[in-house]
Image: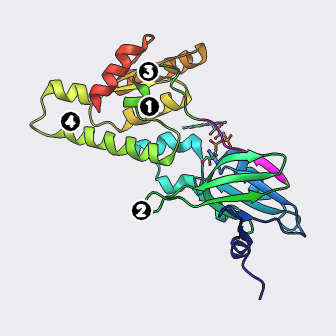
């Protein structure tokens, strides 16, 4: 019986003199190493012909996320699992390793990787992958645009874990606001949301959150461009119907201060 394709790849991990493991190329097929499991990587992995290429995927995230719907999961209108596709389901003949690529040697065509999950004592497996073709699809880090306090105090909206944290916290503040012993002053503070970055994601989050809020809340959005300002006009019309208050903040500092008090 032929070896399972995933098992086959692990069996070709050879220990080097320096103790590191290296995944050797197969002789019959060129190796395409794909870094990442986001939009770029997933679109390739789904369609690549694994009869012609051996596909190895390395990414710290073992699933693809349909990002346009992430804000809806943060407010609970869509369940998290609806947005996810395990990368192994995208192409069962590709080999996936949950790890980050730390360095690439383009001359030797080798990528150095470290396991994403650590043992209890902090050790992480390290290994190298030999490739013929390298596809780098590692995306970007979320930007704070230099707004002070955002990195320390704000919730981000990039990964499922970000949406989980935000959903948990907004549920907490809604429940706290709903308690009979909560004062009007505290309730107003709890229902005061500040969105730093009033682009499509920020506006969608604010709109969806407002639709769900048990009381009229206050949403402060920070636009960066004219394009984003147009979204605010849309929110303005929504506000008239819903009773929520939407405002734009140009100066970042009060916005972040207000956000940090809400946490
Ligand atoms: C909330 C939200 C809503 C969005 N809505 C839209 C929309 O409506 N329309 C639209 O066109 N775009 C939208 N985008 C933007 C879109 O998601 C990005 O443009 C797209 O994800 C970029 O694809 P990518 O493959 O370059 O990177 P990503 O999708 O970010 O994927 C990067 C991958 O690389 C992995 N990785 C990171 N570092 C390493 C490493 N060292 N080694 C190996 N792997 C690594 C990550 O774990 C991840 O799997 C939205 C983004 C967000 C966050």
Is 118 placed above or below 147 here?
Answer: below
Question: Marks 4 and 2, Cα distance to the nearest angstrom?
Answer: 39 Å
Q: Is residue 6 left or right of residue 176?
A: right
Label disc, if present, on residue 221 of the rendered structure: 3
Question: Marks 1 and 3, Cα distance to the nearest angstrom?
Answer: 11 Å
Q: Residue furthest left?
A: 181
Q: Is residue 182 left or right of residue 236?
A: left
Camera-side residue of 119 and 223: 119
Residue 216 appears in the figure: no
Label disc, if present, on residue 16 of the rendered structure: none
Question: Marks 1 and 2, Cα distance to the nearest angstrom?
Answer: 42 Å
Question: Marks 3 and 2, Cα distance to the nearest angstrom?
Answer: 42 Å
Magenta-tinted stretch:
133-140
Q: Residue furthest bottom?
A: 1
Taking the spot 50% from the left edge, 19% from the top edge, the residue there is: 146
Front: mark 4 or 2:
2
Camera-side residue of 62 and 200: 62
Camera-side residue of 78 and 169: 169
Confirm whether the magenta stretch covers residue 165: no
Q: Quadrant of ligand 1?
A: top right
Residue of label 2:
120
């Amino acid at each position: 019986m032929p070896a399972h394709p995933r098992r086959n790849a692990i069996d070709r991990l050879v220990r080097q003199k320096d103790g590191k493991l290296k995944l050797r190329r197969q002789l019959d097929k060129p190796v395409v190493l794909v870094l990442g499991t986001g939009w770029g990587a997933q679109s390739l992995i789904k369609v690549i012909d694994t009869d012609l290429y051996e596909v190895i995927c390395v990414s710290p995230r073992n699933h693809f996320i349909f990002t346009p719907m992430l804000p809806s999961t943060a407010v609970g209108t869509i369940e998290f699992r609806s947005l996810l596709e395990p990368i192994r389901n995208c192409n069962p003949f590709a080999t996936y390793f949950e790890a980050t690529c730390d360095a690439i040697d383009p001359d030797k065509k080798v990528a150095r990787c470290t396991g994403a999950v650590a043992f209890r004592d902090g050790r992480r497996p390290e290994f190298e992958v030999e490739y013929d073709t390298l596809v780098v699809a590692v995306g970007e880090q979320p930007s704070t645009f230099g707004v002070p306090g955002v990195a320390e105090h704000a919730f981000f909206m990039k990964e499922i874990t970000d949406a989980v944290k935000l959903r948990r916290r907004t549920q907490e503040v809604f429940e706290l606001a709903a308690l009979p012993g909560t004062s009007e002053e505290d309730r107003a503070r709890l229902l005061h949301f500040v969105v730093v970055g009033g682009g499509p994601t920020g506006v969608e989050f604010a709109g969806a959150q407002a639709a769900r809020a048990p009381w009229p809340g206050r949403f402060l959005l920070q636009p960066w461009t004219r394009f984003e300002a147009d979204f605010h006009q849309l929110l303005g019309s929504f506000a008239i119907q819903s009773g929520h208050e939407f405002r734009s903040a140009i100066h970042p500092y009060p916005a972040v201060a207000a956000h940090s008090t809400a946490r």
